[in-house]
Image: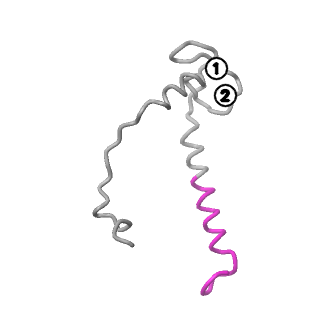
């Protein structure tokens, strides 16, 4: 149900369009212009063709990528005192 002068479904269409645009932006950002490596940059094992096709520009094999993903990522804390979200109750 739309409100005001908008037609029914207009809000959902806008949300879906926003999601589609963001997914496209992420896809373009993930697909670098360089070729995928055939061997892993860390262990020199062969990278399967399916992985190279699915992730253009891939540099690591699955095992090395899992190890890298498991490492803790240190990020600065967020000061939420000034955030509007923290003030809403």
Q: Are marks 1 and 2 in contact (CB under 8 Å)?
A: yes
Per the image, the residue denoted by label 1 is 47
In the rendered image, residue 86, in percent from the top left (x then y), is placed at: 35, 65
Q: Secondary structure at mark 2?
A: helix
Q: Residue furthest front?
A: 89
Query: Callout 1: 10 Å neighbours few (<14), some, many (20+)?
Result: some
User: Residue at coordinates 56% horizontally, 18% vertically from top-left?
Assistant: 40
Per the image, the residue denoted by label 2 is 51
Q: Secondary structure at mark 1?
A: loop
Relative height, residue 44 to residue 62 (above, below): above
- Report the quarter where the N terminus lies: bottom right
Query: Callout 2: 10 Å neighbours few (<14), some, many (20+)?
Result: some
Relative height, residue 23 to residue 40 (above, below): below
- The segment highlighted magenta reads 1-22
Q: Which mark is residue 60?
A: none
Relative height, residue 43 to residue 6 (above, below): above
In the rendered image, residue 17, in percent from the top left (x then y), is placed at: 63, 62
């Amino acid at each position: 149900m739309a409100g005001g002068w908008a037609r029914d479904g207009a809000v959902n269409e806008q949300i879906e369009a926003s999601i589609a645009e963001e997914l496209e932006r992420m896809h373009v950002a993930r697909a670098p212009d360089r070729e995928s490596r055939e061997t892993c940059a860390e262990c020199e094992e062969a990278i399967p063709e399916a992985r190279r096709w699915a992730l253009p520009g891939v540099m690591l094999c699955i095992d090395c990528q899992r190890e890298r993903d498991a490492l803790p990522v240190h990020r600065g804390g967020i000061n939420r005192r000034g955030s509007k979200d923290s003030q809403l109750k």
